[in-house]
Image (spheres, rainbow, N blue to C red):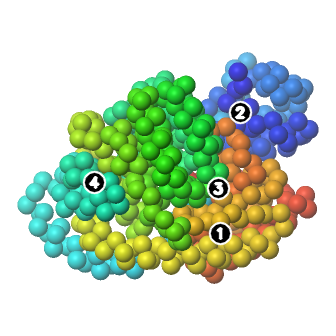
Amino acid sequence: MASRLVTQLGTQDIDDASASGLADRIRALILDGRLTVGERLPSERALALELRRSRSTITRTYGVLEAGGYVSRHHGGSTRVTLPHGPSAAAPDADDEAIDLSIASMDSTPGLYDATVRSLPRLAALRGTSGYSLQGLPELRDAVARRFTERGAVTSADEIMITSGALNAVNLILTALGRRGERALVEQPTFPHALEALHRHGYRLLPTPVDTDGWDARHLTDTLLTARPHVAYLIPDFHNPTGATLPQEERSRIATTARNTGTHLIVDETTAELDIDRGWAPAPMAAEGPNVITVGSMSKIAWGGLRIGWIRAERSVIARLLAVRPSFELGTALLEQCIAVELLDDVPALTHHVRRRLSAGRNAVAAAIAEIPGMRMPETPGGLSAWIDLGAPLSTTLSLAARERGLILPPGPRFTTGGVLERRLRVPITLPPERAAEAMTRLAQAWADVRGGGVNTVDDLAHAAVI
């Protein structure tokens, strides 16, 4: 069985790589977070056998990494991932000139300030309470339940729990329902931090492919039937990062299959309201059965700084969540909940802002990508980003070259379980048009560097989250 390092590397384009080239690829995995600090790497002999390279090549590779501070080696012992210490270049987010495309999120909705002001009397009325809100304010749970009902999944407030964001919701669900050593079905590609959460809770991941033209529904249902995973994590609306939407009939088929196999469906609807011009509105997967657990968030439709999310599940699941939540948090901040009540009182205003901003960002990215030789941008009817086809397996190389141009963007393999999809690149459509145009200019310059063979290595780069 291949080591995790070799799985992440893949075999494409490394057969003839020099020791320094191989070190660059491993360093990129570390900087992208695909190899974690403290993780043990294969021995020189084992890696040489796996890659069918000479041991001297692997020795030089590890030597280059050690000199840069990316691994620590102990004579006769293990080789482990580290990060450089001491003086180094400034972290990317400290550089005012850098454009960070690892964050696919817009600025706040114009109504945020007014909603905050309107929320203060509601907050003041809560001063006589303990201030703790384990399940969430009844008014906010009512508002979230009402939105589910409007979209086609009849919901009551006692089927809702308010959380501190969608990722917090996923971690809470896995804490309550998780089983270490069990299987989890995940889309490939998908949201990287969901993969990390599943890994942290001890799941073995089973990928099922998604592309811009949608899911391989047969592969997905066959995997459910044969592997009978304990959980499945899906993003059915404006999938992150491909932008695809799961057809209504396939939602019903998948939910029914999962119910028959005893699989908990964790459905992430963080991107569900990010419609530009899709032309149709599917009902939530929550309408398909009690085995569907839905997470959602205000972060993409209102503001990332408003840390409000929710879980919609049957009452027995909510009870389990309430039982475990106090072990790591005692509820969600009341001020943010009061603001969210005000914002959800006018959903059309939120979605209008989203549509206008995303449309302008998409048009700016599309116009620029059309001028970059070899790249292709698919139709993008909504969502956070465009899933760009590079036409060649150069995503990690391009990502490193882009940093030298002041552009931070995660390569395609960052969104996968095994270092694949080197032909793909996620480009957010969330920036204002003028900022998006500047980002695309830098991308074009980095692409020219890659195609011209003029990419230099970068010694010190901070590891960044992917949002």
Vertical position of residue 236 compared to residue 186: above or below: below
Instruction: Please state which amino acid type lies under the numbered disc 3.
Output: Thr
Q: In this view, does 127 lie to the left or right of 325?
A: left
Q: Which mark is residue 154?
A: 4
Residue 225 vertical position relative to residue 131 in the rendered view, above or below: above
The amino acid on which the numbered mark 2 sits, given as a three-letter code, is Thr
**Which of marks 3 and 1 precedes in the sequence?**
1
Residue 36 seen by the camera: no
Frontmost residue, 76 versus 61? 61
Give the quadrant of residue 97.
bottom right
Residue designated by label 3: 212
For the point 20% across and 73% down, the residue is 120
Amino acid identity at mark 4: Val
Q: How far apart are marks 1 and 3 (CA)?
A: 29 Å
Question: What residue is pinned by disc 1?
Answer: 98
Lower sequence index among marks 3 and 2: 2
Question: Distance from label 3 to label 4 (Cα)?
Answer: 30 Å
180 sits left or right of 314 in the view: right
Q: Mark 4 to mark 2: distance in Å?
A: 43 Å
